[in-house]
Structures are given as structure tokens and as C-alpha cells.
Image (spheres, rainbow, N blue to C red):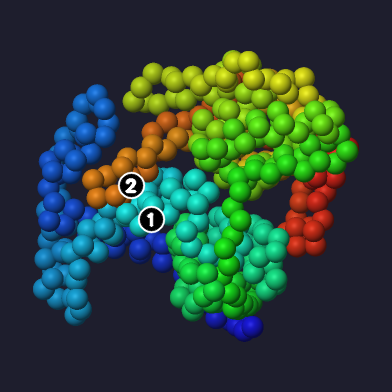
Amino acid sequence: MVSSKNKWEEKKTSLGNAIIIGVVLAIVGFFIGLTAPSWAGKFAQYFGARTRVESNVDWSSLDTVYEYLLTYYDGEISEKDVIEGAKKGLTAALGDVYTVYMDAEEARDFQNDLHGTIEQAGVGIEMGLRDGYVRVLRTLPDNPARAAGILAGDILYKVDGEDVYALSVDEIANKVRGDVGSNVTLTVVRNGEELSFTMTRESINNVSTYTEYEGHTAIVTVTRFDNKTGELVQQEVAQHFDEHGVNKVILDLRGNGGGYVTAARDLLSLWIDGDTVLVQKSKHSTDDVTKALSGRAVLKDMKTVVLVNGSTASASEIVAGTLQDYGKATVLGEKTYGKGVVQSLINLYDGSYLKVTTASWYTPLGRTINKTGIEPDVVVERSYDDINNMVDPQMDAARKQ
């Protein structure tokens, strides 16, 4: 364990500059060796009947920059790396954190995460962007990070000595993962000091939902919405609720960053019978209305409390907001993250993905989610100290509702 407060204070101030410089350098390389018509044609095929948009942008200035780099740069230049970085730079220049280019490896990891398949081992950390830094949101029980002493609220600063504080959540997560049995050293910042922890990676249990029973109360925790989540909860309700005499449900969506809208719809269909659960609006198309499935609302009259916090995002906000709109649940906790935009995945020819924001979500009553979040009916906060000391005032309050 190493402490280096002064070094952290110096580097902290460079975070914003590092991000800006990274984006600018990536954009500089964009479209090296490509022409506007060629890229437009490649993208057009993925947008169905939409009219191809021709570009009148003059990219010659970027060609000039590249020529100067070839002439003067004292190092090796990989055309492939430059082009890959340029694609990332183009999406980053939009200023939308949800619109990103993923190379083939990143695309595979993204799909594996979404389906709950982690091919590589990890240390059991849930992380998210908070207050401008990627922080530990919680450590998973019986996993290396908790045993080592990493705490909720810690800022992810280095992985194996490499600075990662300017990287995205997904980029840091990929660096933390590795082979089972291999070691990884994470350096975090806590109260302005650097602390380093060396851990051995283990296989991580990555289930999307699990249910616990306390008397006649079912506590259903949903960590993400993958393609099986809705079905798994429906099966749990059908097979075990009667035997436990369940008369109250606590639906825990804290830390749930979202996933498939269809999975959120399937879950909502336990409370909502065939009615609207989501309205999707886009400047490119007419409004798209998603309705709950019919004939499955076995919990429509069940007393329900939904737990949310600042990490409850996207599809999980749809669930909380919809149940709130219909008066089917009491939403308890903290204001949600506020990610109410839709991303479409465009599978490119080489296995890479373009994840593009294509629309915005609204609750059945027309409330916007993006950048506003869902306000809880009952506000109960849970601090990092509470999490680290295994104290849960939000769950305690939900039990009393």
C-alpha cells in the first residue's frame, strides 16, 4: 500500500486537459485515407429506408495534418491505429457520452457484458462515473476487491501502474479483467491519497437478478436488464411467490445501469397489463409506443416498493418511472441518474460497433428522463460510509413502507 497525496493533487488538475487532448488528437486523424462518399455509403446500409446523407465537409485539412505527421513525427505510425482512433474521435466530437465507436474486441466485450457473460476474470467491483471521476460504487461479496479493502467511493486511478483516471468506465473495466489466477494492482484515490491493492483475479458470478424472502416480503434485486432478466423474474414469481405467501415486493434497482428495453417491458408486464410503458421520440421518425404484455400482470395489486439511487439508469429508470406513473409502486431512495436516450447498435462489416443515440425516452405520462432522472416519492440517502459499513437505511425504510 502506497500513499502519495501530493502526486495525486498535481495529476487531478490535468484530468480535463487529458480528456480534451485525447479527443482532439483522435479527431485529427479522422478519415485518413478515406473520402466522404465512401464512409457515407458504408453507413447508409444500416439505416434501412433512410435517405443517404451526403457530406459537403472538406476533410483536406486533416489530410494535411497527417502528411505533416508522416513527415516530422519521430516514431512509428500505424495507419490502422490512426484510423481506429479517428473513428473514436468522430463520435467523441459529438459531445454525447452515449454515442461511441467500439472496435471488434470492445464490441465483443460489450455484448458479453450485456448478456451476462464475462469471459475474463475480475476482482468484483461495480464502478460508475460520479462527480467527474470513475468511482467504486460497491464491491461484490466474497470477491477479491472487498477482501483487499477497496471501498465504495474510491476513485479508480491506476491499473498495474498505468494511469486510467481519464478513461471511461468500460475502458477501465476491460483493463481490470484478465485471466483467472493472474494478479492485478489497482491504485485508488481516497481522501486525496493514493492507495494500491494487489489482488488475484477470480471468476465473477454475474447474475442479472436474484430474489430473497423475508417473511411474506420478496426482495427482488435486478442488477441489469439482459435478454433473460424479465423471463427469470416471471419464473421466480410463478414458482415461488405462492409458497412464501408473498404480499409485498421490494424491487431493488439500485446500481442498475440498464440494458434491453424488452427486458424492462417484460418485467413491467408483471404489474401493467397491456398498457403503455414507454414512449420513444426521435427527429428521424414518428413516436414509437411500447406496451406491456397482456395477461401477465399477476402483481398488479401487489404492494410494491422500488429502490433507486444515483446509479439507477436507462431501462431501470423506465421501470421506476412507469410504476410511479401508474401508482403501482412507491419509489424510494435517491434521484436516479437521468439517462433517457436510446442507443442503436450498428454492426459494422469488420465486427466493430457504432452505438448511436437515436431517440429519447418518456414515461407513459410524458415525463422526460434524460438529464432529469426520476424523483423518488420518499427520499432516503445512503452514503459511501453506509455502504462500506454494510448499513442500508434505504432497505430499512422500504421494509417499513
- Which quadrant of the figure contains the C terminus? top right
Choose between 313 and 274: the one closer to the eye: 274
Question: Which quarter of the picture shows residue 239?
Answer: top right
Q: Is residue 343 left or right of residue 149?
A: left
Q: In the rendering, which numbered label is found on residue 243?
A: none
Residue at 58 percent of width and 67 percent of height: 202
- Alpha-carbon span between mark 2 and mark 1: 8 Å
Q: Residue at x 52, y 69 (%)?
A: 180
Q: Secondary structure at mark 1?
A: helix
Is residue 177 among what the camera can see? yes
The numbered mark, 2 or 1, whose residue comes first in the sequence reads: 1
* In the image, residue 200 above or below residue 396: below
Please name whichever residue, 339 or 203, is drawn nearer the observer in this view of the structure.
203
Which is nearer the eye, 245 or 163?
245
* Badge 2 element: strand
Q: Is residue 9 visible?
A: no
Q: Amino acid at mark 2?
A: Tyr
| Residue 373 on image: x %, y % | 61, 37
Q: In which quadrant of the rendered image does the N terminus lie? A: bottom right
Residue ID at (77%, 48%): 381
Amino acid, disc 1: Glu
Residue 316, percent from left and from top: 60, 37
Q: Quadrant of residue 104?
A: bottom left
Q: Residues within 10 Å of mark 1 (few under 14, many from 20)?
A: some
The image quarter containing residue 8 is bottom right
Q: Which residue is mark 1?
A: 106
Residue 353's disc is: 2
Decide: is 230 above or below 9. above
| Residue 310 left/right relative to 12 | right
* Residue 124: percent from left, percent from top: 61, 62
Q: Do the numbered discs 2 and 1 sit on residues whose CB atoms are within 8 Å? A: yes
Which residue is pictured at 44% across the width and 20% down the height? Answer: 288
